[in-house]
Amino acid sequence: MSLRRPHRKSRNGCTECKRRRVKCNEQQPCHNCIKYQSNCIFVTDLGQQIQSQVRPKPSMSGAGQRPFTLVIGAVESLPGPPLCDLARNADFESRDLELMHHFSTSVARTLSYRNDIQDVWAISLPKEAYSCDYLMHGLLAISALDLSFSSRILSSCEKRRDYADLSTYHLHRSLARFRERLANISTENCVPLFGLSSLMVIHVCAQSTLEIGSQPGRENLASHVEMLMKIFNMCRGVESILAPYRGEIYQSPLSSLLHDDYRLVGDLSSHDNIDRTLAEEPPFADLVNLVRNREREPQEQNKYLDALTKLGTAFRFMRTASQPLEPGAAFVWPIILQRDSIRLFMQLTPLSLVLLAHYCVILHHLNGYWFLHDWHKALLAEITDFLPLDLKTWVTWPRKVCGLNDVSEI
């Protein structure tokens, strides 16, 4: 009996070859797109390819071994219209000037309260993007996404869909080029890679805001926690990208994005302008006792206690930072967490949900940023509804800080 031939078909071809149903040689640009002068775009499983192409970089936080897999994996999962439909719409390219103007004059001023950081977003980043196509597409994607949020507020469904499609188009154009640079990360390209990674974190946060805000409810808690964990993993990936090249980025025009605002320096009394609610710490001693009484298995108990300790560190960072808080306060805890803790959150264990409920307090103090606005309240309400009756009282403090009803009134 003759042996069967091995299956050699691949699903990794470009979108244009898939649309035409022809064989792609999987090089960019591929031979068919060169022949027909088509736009050659790959949106395959980037994570799998990155794993084999990119050597892991050392991480200051001890984060995962494939940082770019974490970053792109989170962005690839974002909802959006089919790219093959978007790529044929020539109107998108003609609107670049509109998006660039909106980013520099409006969006950049919403990404920070500090004037020097606003100038980086408004001036330095666009200047860097002029010679870097994937960074430019990432910038335009954020600009279009912000316009879709504005249209949402104005209740214009048609405009919202239009700008959302435009954002998706530029997002995928950015990722297609981004992937090509991953195999050769160096001191020459680390700055635009860092800039784009920062934009991608904002993009994923904004999409999560849309998703959680439009679909609240206990039945959606699992998917919403999964979204949050994608943000956590993405932050860890960006930190791993940054760590080996921190010196180069400090010397770049984007250096202000690496401000040292979250150092554990000084004490609370030196920050007179801190809100009283922010000055209050969660009941950490009580939470430690809860973990020890509820989880008796030593290894699992240590995971919870480590996550709780890191949450305390994040609160101290937030407490000693200058006011108003920068978005980086939201990402301190995700970056310093152990990977095992993220696995616990994905399992929706009651103790992990209690910790996430207290993390919502940090997000509450960043509610002024459009890409983080209000979804912590929906998440906190879902967590409260999901918790067993004997644990609901443990979210009393975060609900009070976030302006939600007392647990006894639910």
Image: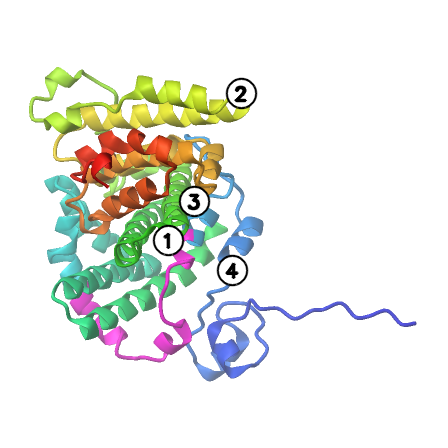
Of the residues shown, which amino acid type is indicated by label 4? Answer: Asp
Of the residues shown, which amino acid type is indicated by label 2? Answer: Pro
Q: Could you tell me which residue is drawn at 18 percent across and 28 percent down?
A: 321
Of the residues shown, which amino acid type is indicated by label 1? Answer: Asn
Nearer the N terminus, badge 4 or badge 3? Answer: 4
The answer to whether marks 4 and 2 mark residues whose Cβ atoms lie closer than 8 Å is no
**For the magenta stretch, what is the residue range?**
74-99
Of labels 4 and 2, the one closer to you: 2
Q: Which residue is mark 4?
A: 45
Mark 3 Cα shell of 10 Å, populated few (<14), some (14-19), many (≥20): some
| Residue 195 seen anywhere in this rendered image of the structure | yes
- Tell me: residue 196, above or below residue 380: below
Q: Quadrant of the C terminus?
A: top left
Of labels 1 and 3, the one closer to you: 1
Q: Secondary structure at mark 4?
A: loop
In the rendered structure, find residue 298 and report the number of the disc placed on it.
Answer: 2
For marks 1 and 3, give the CA distance: 41 Å
| Residue 326 seen anywhere in this rendered image of the structure | no
